[in-house]
Amino acid sequence: MAITPGYTVEEIRNFVYQHGKIPHGYKSLWLAEQEFSLHQFRKWRLATFNGDLDRGLIPRSRAGKVPYNPRQLMQSSIEENQAKRIAELEERNAQLEAANEALGKAIGLLHDRNAQEPDVTPTTPKPSNS
């Protein structure tokens, strides 16, 4: 049984983060407007803060309660996601730089090749009719 029926991991994480940003007193109103139940949201919240969401694990009991400071965990989770994204972007940047370097070398070789060839085809002198 999956923890995310009909929702992606990112959508669930965004629901949990949105809920954390809502002022006290409005959270139950926000939950009532959503298509998922409070019970489902609590499972998602536990999975998000316990680090089980990405692995698709479902919390089995309340033994793994959300820690005392969920906002701190939310911030650390955001920072982890940003660090992952930065690492992905740095890897992609390195790939693009390598491709750019290879293209630069290829263009340089083409310029060298064109420089060695004469611009005008040599003409043979016409024999004189004398």
Image (spheres, rainbow, N blue to C red):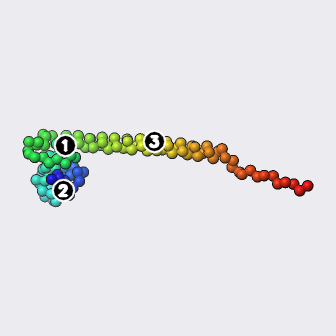
Task: Kindly report the distance in space between the C-alpha atoms of the residues bearing marks 2 and 1.
Answer: 18 Å
Q: Position of residue 81 (x, y in %)?
A: 27, 43
- Report whether residue 22 is seen: no
What is the three-letter code of the residue carrying label 3?
Answer: Ala
Q: Which residue is mark 1?
A: 51
The mark nearer the N terminus, 2 or 1, is: 2
Tag shown at residue 98: 3
Secondary element type, mark 1: loop
Task: Kindly report the distance in space between the C-alpha atoms of the residues bearing marks 2 and 3.
Answer: 41 Å
Q: Position of residue 118 (x, y in %)?
A: 69, 47
Q: Which residue is mark 2?
A: 5
The mark nearer the N terminus, 2 or 3, is: 2
Q: Is residue 1 above or below residue 69?
A: below
Which residue corresponds to the image point at 69% horizontal and 49% vertical from the top-left? 119
Q: Are marks 2 and 1 in contact (CB under 8 Å)?
A: no
Secondary element type, mark 3: helix
Q: Nearer the viewer, residue 87 or 66?
A: 87
Secondary element type, mark 2: loop
